[in-house]
Image (cartoon, rainbow, N blue to C red):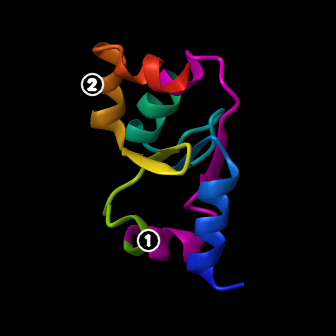
């Protein structure tokens, strides 16, 4: 499968998807750790892709999303952003509104 098509399928398949370094239980960077910690507060089913274990996705996701860094959070098929944006949205309650 074409990798961009694979990414598109993943993004559209899951309501909440995070492309991160590591896993929710063992994040492998501070930004991924902070982002997943916030997302888990909402008790929603979260799907993840470890970009350190998926080199093709790590290379092509920035081209797909036009976002250069990780983590990348998609909600309902839309790129929301990374750690700073998720943190800010959590603080101002916009993330809660989006996830509920």
Q: What element carries label 1?
A: helix
Q: Where is residue 43 shown, x and y percent of the image?
A: 65, 17
Residue with the mark numbered 2: 88
Left or right: where 9 falls relative to 96:
right
Q: Does residue 45 show up magenta in the picture?
A: yes
Q: Quadrant of the N terminus?
A: bottom right
Residue with the mark numbered 1: 64
Q: Is residue 21 visible?
A: no
Residue at 59% x, 22% y: name it. Answer: 40
Left or right: where 71 falls relative to 85:
right
Left or right: where 43 falls relative to 60:
right
The Cα–Cα distance between marks 1 and 2, rounded to whole angstroms, is 24 Å
In the foreground, 39 or 98: 98
Q: Where is residue 89 shown, x and y percent of the image?
A: 32, 24
Quarter assignment of residue 93: top left
In this picture, is 65 found above or below 97?
A: below
In this picture, is 75 found above or below 97?
A: below
In the foreground, 13 or 36: 13
In this picture, is 95 found above or below 66?
A: above
Quarter assignment of residue 76: top right
Mark 1 vs mark 2: which is more N-terminal? 1
Span shown in magenta: 38-62
């Amino acid at each position: 499968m074409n990798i961009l098509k694979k990414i598109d399928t993943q993004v559209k398949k899951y309501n909440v998807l995070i492309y991160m370094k590591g896993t929710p239980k063992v994040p492998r960077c501070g930004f991924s750790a902070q982002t997943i910690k916030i997302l888990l507060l909402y008790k929603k089913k979260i799907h993840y892709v470890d970009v350190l274990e998926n080199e093709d996705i790590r290379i092509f996701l920035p081209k797909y999303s036009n976002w250069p860094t990780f983590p990348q959070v998609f909600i309902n098929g839309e790129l929301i952003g990374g750690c700073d944006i998720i943190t800010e949205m959590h603080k101002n309650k916009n993330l809660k509104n989006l996830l509920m």
